[in-house]
Amino acid sequence: MTSREGELLNTVNMTNCDREPIHIINRSQSHGVILACNPTNLEVTHYTQNVEEILGLLPENFLNRSASNILPPFSRKLVLSLGKEKHVLPKIKFKNRDFLVIAHNNGNHVILEFEPVEDSGSDPLLLQDDLTNILNKLNSSNDITTLCRNAAGLIKSLLGYDRVMLYRFDENWNGEVIAEEKEEALGSWLGLHYPATDIPKPSRDLFLKQGVRIIGDVFAEQSILLPDGPYPLDLSRSELRGVSEIHIQYLKNMKVGASLTAALALNGKLWGLIACHHSSPKFINYHQRQSVKFLSQVFTNNLSVKTSEIFLEKVERSKAIRNLLASQMTSNVSISEALTKMEIKFTDLINCNGGALFLNGNLDLAGTTPTPKQIKILVSEVLLNKKDLFYTNSIGSIYPKALEYKEFASGVLSVKIGEKSNDLLIFFRKEFSQTVNWGGNPNKNEVIKDGVSYLSPRKSFEKWTQEISGKSRPWKSYDFEAVQALQEKITHQIVQHQKAEINNLNALLVSANNELQAFSYSVSHDLRAPLRGITAYTRILQEDFSGNLNEEAKGILEKIINSAGAMDQLIIDLISYASLGEKAVAKKPVDIKKLVTEITDTLQLEPGFAQTDIKIDQSLPDAIGDPRLIHQLFINLLSNAFKYSARVEDPCVEVGFNSLADGSVEYFIKDNGIGFDPRHREKIFTVFSRLVGNEFSGTGIGLAIAKKVIDKHQGKIDVETKPGHGANFRFTLSLGSGSFNSINKKV
Ligand code: BLA
């Protein structure tokens, strides 16, 4: 190791390998000269040390002076108006050689790069031939493999490098040589893999910006930018940017004397590189590099078309399968049967070797899969904790238990289905055992010095073979798209099934309810007949045999008649409650004021209610509803009001209405009677929930009927009460059209 390498290792460790600021390297490659100028007056601020050797200029003659004197005639104006785009100025001679000046503005400085140019590379006719050839050859490639091979072949014949490779990145930025054109004497690198650390992120990022770069002479001393100030120049877009020593070492270890690298970007992301090697120094001029840029562009256009064709083909295929699955699901079988037992299985949707469907706690399998027990454990320990869509091509690496079944299921893709969080659709992909040939053992680039580990380019690039296990082929974006579209269809179907189930249950409920009503109706009728018999015979006993009976027996007969009467009333109420359910609600205007007046007049005739003071609001609005039901409602509420206030001093029943905030009204029926504990407010509206003792007659169904009437009219009923302070029943009904005048009057 030379002392220089030693220095290098001191400064580069595992983490700063990815952080080396290669864009401010402050060096130029040896074959050209960089000058930097103030963008407003073009005064030269920086120059590379080789300026005298290459251009024959002395720094003292141009530093801090305008660069106009060094530039081709008439180019000053253009240079002053430069943006980030590069401009090539007309050829200019220095030391009897032609130079191109490539100029751009890096944001702070105008960067002028002087590069020698040979005539051959800039002949417009030759160039046109080259470009036509590139277009024809690449556009006629039928598939991606041929496209790559043709691109490598074209570059080899255009530029004459010893080895030209198409290098493709994987999702972790490792790469593989997927096409190669080379001198026969060289060994092939086709199929070799290289680790991501060989091309760190800063280098990949610069590539996206710059496109094409040459390293003209790996062995030449690079030229330092002067003066060496604290604010280094940003050379991100520079053609002549110097090369990191680490990479120089890498190329030397690879026995490469010169290189050209061109970015291949797909949808704005680095897809791969064209990597060219030459054993000796090699210089490719700016125009030739532009042809390579053109080629890269044509290449990626073709690549993009071909990738989208593959994508579309996959999408079309999965769409067809999805539609078949959807029609299976709408046939008369369960969802799991439709997806796992019929001709088309859900696993036909994408490339996989098996799958599992978890629905309502049941597990159904298709194709080759781990055992149901293994799947259940995988689901509960891993998949249920994941988001809506989860995938991996190496489940064993995150969940070692899964290594047991890596042959069938190294790849797992799962999505949640339906509205429950534990229903899942799972796809398995088998292990894809793979032999990966690396260009040199990628683990052998670590050097330990003074107890610290550093990453440095490896010394040997001899093929190093690695067996990869526990991995499946990776899932692709069209897989996700297909699975998510099926997920939607299944969820839709699950919801449909749930709806159908609810409708079914509803129908059952309706018929059960009908039966119950018919039953209670007939039972009630059948019960009344014997009751009438009991009452009639008791009356005969009273009338015809009273002489034979003592006072106690007469009292008992009276009780029999009363009890039979109470029971008859109960049956009548039951019939009316049960029959409420069956009847459709008629919608007619009902004159509430008239109704209330009639009912209270009648009630007042009953013994015990004559003293009751009645207050009826004379502007009570009309309601819309079923007259018979509304009549029943008011009878029930009013007779309660009369009944439970009858025994207080100065009994009073009041009927009125309140205007509500939303413009509607509520009626109220208020008494000053015995009231009840407000904790029972809800209970009193259910059947048989009389709260008061036996001293008040009644069956306890009245309020249940009232509530049912209100429900049938989509209204609300509530009560305010306190024991000893009466009750105030408030309820809403739809209003009749004629009611508004009276309401407005009142408001
Ligand atoms: C740069 N490494 C690169 C570049 C390539 C590779 C293509 C860009 C070269 C350029 O800008 O012209 C790698 N070249 C390859 C590979 C092949 C090839 C894989 O031909 C296969 C056929 N390099 C290392 C390690 C580090 C490293 C361990 O091996 C870091 C510790 C660094 N590589 C590194 C740096 C650069 C680089 C810093 C940027 C060089 C620069 O632009 O200055």
Image (cartoon, rainbow, N blue to C red):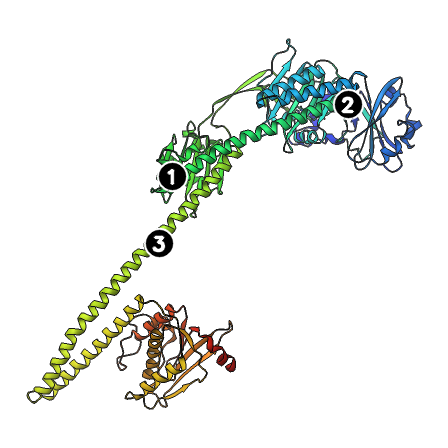
Task: Measure the alpha-carbon separation of dots 2 and 3.
Answer: 76 Å
Q: Nearer the viewer, residue 477 or 106?
A: 477
Q: Amino acid at mark 2?
A: Tyr
Question: CB at mark 2 closer than 8 A to ligand 1?
Answer: no
Is the residue 207 above or below the residue 556 in the image?
Answer: above
Of badges 2 and 1, the one in the foreground is 1
Is the residue 69 above or below the residue 81 in the image?
Answer: above
Is the residue 689 above or below the residue 223 in the image?
Answer: below
Is the residue 158 above or below the residue 368 in the image?
Answer: above
SS class of the residue under badge 1? Answer: helix
SS class of the residue under badge 2? Answer: helix
Q: Amino acid at mark 1?
A: Gln
Q: Nearer the viewer, residue 212 or 450?
A: 212
Residue depicted at x 46% and y 77%: 738
**Left or right placement of residue 563 versus residue 336 in this view:** left
The part of the image, by quadrant, that contains residue 191 is top right
Residue at the spot of label 2:
286
Residue at the spot of label 1:
328
SS class of the residue under badge 3? Answer: helix
Task: Measure the alpha-carbon separation of dots 2 and 1.
Answer: 62 Å
